Amino acid sequence: MQRVLVKERPNLGQIAEEHELEFVSGEGITGWDESAYYSFNLQQIEQDIEAPAQELEEMCLQVVDRAVKTESVLDRLGIPETFWDYLASSWNDGEKNLLGRMDFSYNQGEPIKLLEYNADTPTTLYESAILQWEWLEQTKEQGLIDQNCDQLNEIHDSIISAFSKLEISTLTHFACNKDIEDDKGTLDYIEECAQEAGIETKFVAMSDIGLDDQGLLTDLSDQIITRLVKMYPWEWIMDEQFGTNVPSCGVTFFEPPWKAILANKGLMALMWGMFEGHPNLLPTFFEDDSECEKFIDGGNYVRKPLLSRQGANIKIVQGSKIISQTDGPYGEQPNVIQGLERLPKFEGGYPLIGCWLVASRVQGLCIREGDSLITGTSAKVIPHVILD
């Protein structure tokens, strides 16, 4: 993996306008950086990243299968008891999933290490699927990069294909907190993909979802919601006023309820418990595990809340000293303790490798580059190429 400097396209402001993205003069497109790219050879992509990510996805599904049969596991994850049967039913009924993004540390010469799985509400999707691919095509046309460059990027077509295979013939609602810009932008793109697949869609803000006399979910027009694609974490839905009605409301959700297990940072402890020693996993324990004390005493670890977003409330300890930490609203939650695997350091910062999965198949790569070991909201998506 190499970080290569490259000229930016001269019309970035126009590109931002076409994509309805924020553009700041002198800084570029917010959340995006094309002053450099990361270059991989085909072996690195196929053997070092893609194959392990696909294997880990299959392992994750094994974890779900075990979790829905084990109430103590669901309790350990902090999932309310009123939802246990609901999660189990969604898994046993084979409810389909759409999207997820696995985040890895990739230090060359070593196996990639799974840090966490954004399995429920992954963002940076549009930048990964559209901006990145458009950059590849245009920079090749302009002679800025080698004509033989390619990408691991089948994200857009695979999302449309996944929607088509669902054979949906009725209205599908799309919902999020409309005030969270990243979530709304991501959801808008997913909705466009659904429309390309021939699905009739309608947006509803999560705050505008109500209940009818029979306890069914409705939108502002009192139309009953039967399918809902959401960019809204399952743990938030469980806390909503209508949350207690969700298990009996008859709505098909995307992501499905069983994805709440994979979106929980406790997943990493469950995976280590089932697949201890796997080369792509880090030792991870629930903080109150008896094994955890020895691990903490070793002085090299990362503490993460079970449920958090955008790198909030994370603490990295090396040599028994805190070397990086973030604040946030999740500080009162239980934590997992994970073995320390530092992100590699390049001139532009610390790259985090994201693998996009669509319908549980690896379909794309996303690199977010931040200025610290904890990848947060200030990180920018930076494109990648495959070149032998």
Image (tube, helix red, strand yellow):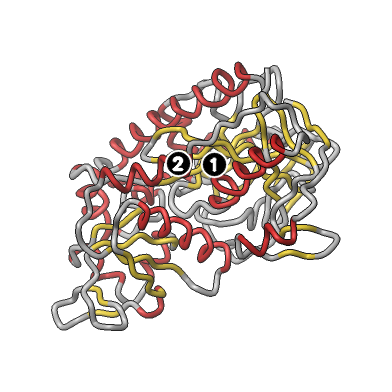
The number of callouts visible is 2
Q: Which tag, 1 or 2, sits closer to the chain's start?
A: 1
Task: Quickly name the residue at label 2.
Answer: 267
What mark, if any, has residue 116 been given in the picture?
1
Q: Is residue 198 above or below residue 223?
A: above
> Which one is nearer the viewer's eye here, 216 or 65?
216
Is the residue marked by circle 1 packed among few (<14), some (14-19), or many (20+) residues within 10 Å?
many
What mark, if any, has residue 124 been given in the picture?
none
List x then y, in percent, for residue 222.
Answer: 24, 82
List x then y, in percent, for residue 276.
Answer: 48, 24
Q: Is residue 225 above or below residue 362?
A: below
> Which one is nearer the viewer's eye here, 308 or 203?
203
> Which one is nearer the viewer's eye here, 343 or 28?
28
Q: Is residue 53 above or below residue 379?
A: above
Does 8 sit left or right of 289 as displayed?
right
Q: Is residue 21 above or below residue 275?
A: below
Dot 2: element: helix
Asked which quadrant contains residue 19, the reply is bottom right
Does 79 sit left or right of 332 as displayed?
left
- Closer to viewer: mark 1 or mark 2: 1
